[in-house]
Image (cartoon, rainbow, N blue to C red):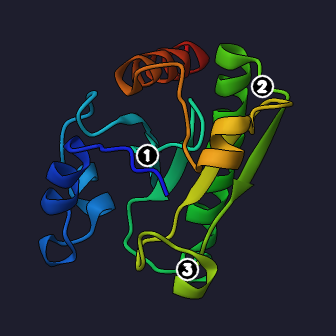
Amino acid sequence: MKHIWSPWRMKYLEKHRKDNGCVFCNEQSKADNAENLIAFRGELAYVILNRYPYASGHLMVIPFEHKSSIEELDSKTRAEMMELASQCMTALRNIYKPQGFNMGANIGEAAGAGVLGHVHIHIVPRWSGDTNFMSALSETRVLPEALEDTYKRVRDEFGKMRR
């Protein structure tokens, strides 16, 4: 097996250990900028970039309220989350012109949830052939854009959509 080193990730992992609280609650308490990657705040939920994306533009919709599953949220929060997920798709279509999307939530450890305890919805833009030899053979993702640039583009697009 080949190893690709990403030493910057250890700083993030240490900063967001479980004993430091919920990563999503911690991020939402900060001012919105390229550090916490929150691109838009609604009334009950917010849109944030995935720090370790599957593709450029990988977004997540997260309720402000710390709940482990969608059915624990009130109907108004669930409705806003779905509306924000739809707006994420619109923004990503405008920015990246994807040919499709993966959208979903991993609820519980058995389902592959990376952050247990705070439910969230992933929105991942997809293109035909975006699973190339690097992903298929090397288990490595190549992203064509810096995360800070993606953040600016998504934040700006949400700003345009809200005018």
* Residue 149 in which image quadrant: top left
The disc label shown at residue 52, or none: 1
* Residue 91 in which image quadrant: top right
Q: Is residue 68 above or below residue 134?
A: below
Residue 27, x across and y down, in percent: 25, 51
Element at badge 1? loop
Within 10 Å of the Cα at label 2, are there few (<14), some (14-19), or many (20+) other Cα atoms? Answer: some
Residue 161, x across and y down, in percent: 60, 18
Q: Is residue 80 visible?
A: no
Q: Earlier in the sequence, mark 1 or mark 3?
A: 1
Q: Residue at x 68, y 53 (%)?
A: 82
The disc label shown at residue 98, or none: 2
The disc label shown at residue 60, or none: none
Q: Residue at x 47, y 56 (%)?
A: 62
Amino acid type of the residue tagged 1 in the rendering: Tyr
Within 10 Å of the Cα at label 1, are there few (<14), some (14-19), or many (20+) other Cα atoms? Answer: few
Question: What residue did someone put label 3 on?
Answer: 69
Residue 8, x across and y down, in percent: 21, 42
Q: How far separated are the C-alphas under marks 1 and 3? A: 22 Å
In contact (CB < 8 Å): disc 1 and disc 3:
no
Q: Nearer the viewer, mark 1 or mark 3?
A: 1
Element at badge 3? loop
Amino acid type of the residue tagged 2 in the rendering: Pro
- Identify which residue, 44 or 34, lies in the foreground: 34
Q: Is residue 55 above or below residue 62?
A: above
Element at badge 2? loop
